[in-house]
Image: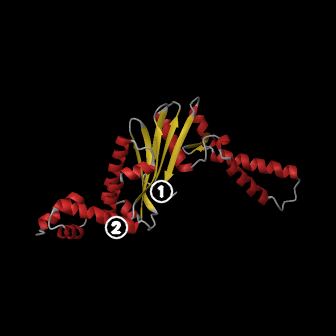
Amino acid sequence: MVTAQLVKELRDRTGISMMDCKSALMESDGDIEKAIEVLRKKSVLKAEKKSGRATNEGAIVLGNSDAVDFIIEVDTETDFAAKDASFQSFLEDLSAYVAENNPTDLEELNNNYKENLLGIIQKIGENIKISYFEKMEKDEGVVASYKHSDNKLAAVVKMSGGDESVGRDIAMQVAANNPMAIYPEDIDSSVLEKEKEIALATLANENKPDEIKEKIIMGKLNKFKMENSLVEQPFIKDPDKKIKDLLGDTKILGFLRKKVGE
């Protein structure tokens, strides 16, 4: 017999709706362990049905362990779901899992955390995806991070040395300004070629000598490289300084940046 007490117990153990708990208990003749299996199977089916639905909202998890700092993006269908208490608890558990187990990449994380993901899909009733996972090793230098207050944007920076507070400021810079590379010479040549094509197109109808056009194009490309390389960007807290002015002899070794939906 399925009693209200059994339904409540199953609800407390799984966090799944009372209606689904009651249905699972009826299907399993009041056996809670069997009902949990029923719910797990149903959550897989529900997840498959929801998998085609767009996930344009979500949250960023910024975490760390003794070995790494990491960024995870978890996407939801609605901002309402992203702020749900159960979803926030899921993010905390996910961060703790990654810190303890240090998965190799996104594929391994998704494979190993599949059951937990199915559980939150069942609870929230939306399509939810772990869509991004990258980490920065702490094997040398200083690693610092920043996450925006809306939990939708974060960055991690690794430096050869220096002060962690400077590292946090630079991580904030990365989050806000989204540089393409650390140094101008690191910007991908294919990107520069595209910018050159754009610059040429804007000068196509200009009645100027070719050598003047070439100087204009080179000027535009240099400006583009300065704007999109981290060390050459004006510091957001003090635009009279560039990021390279904060570093001294310290080198930036790498950075990560992730914004929900990008």
Depth check: give the residue in front, 207 or 254: 254
**Image location (x, y in percent) of residue 58:** 42, 59
**Callout 2: SS:** helix
Sequence-first tag of 2 and 1: 2
The residue shown at (82%, 50%) is 214
Along the horizontal axis of the image, is 202 left or right of 178? right
Count of marks placed on residues: 2
- Check disc 2: other Cα within 10 Å, few if <14, some if 14-19, many if 20+: some
Marking on residue 46: 2
Kind of residue at disc 2: Lys
Q: Is residue 10 above or below residue 95?
A: below
Marking on residue 104: none
**Image location (x, y in percent) of residue 206:** 84, 60
Along the horizontal axis of the image, is 27 left or right of 42? left
The residue shown at (44%, 62%) is 57
Q: Nearer the viewer, mark 2 or mark 1?
A: 2
**Callout 1: SS:** loop
Residue 167: tell me if it is visible.
yes
Kind of residue at disc 1: Val
Residue 125: tell me if it is visible.
no
- Spatial CA span between label 2 and label 1: 24 Å
The residue shown at (59%, 29%) is 249
| Picture quadrant where residue 17 is located | bottom left
Marking on residue 260: 1
Report if the CB atoms under discs 2 and 1 are less than 8 Å apart.
Answer: no
Depth check: give the residue in front, 2 or 57: 2
**Image location (x, y in percent) of residue 200:** 78, 56
Q: Is residue 256 above or below residue 202?
A: above
Instruction: Look at the image and tell me in which quarter the N terminus lies.
Output: bottom left
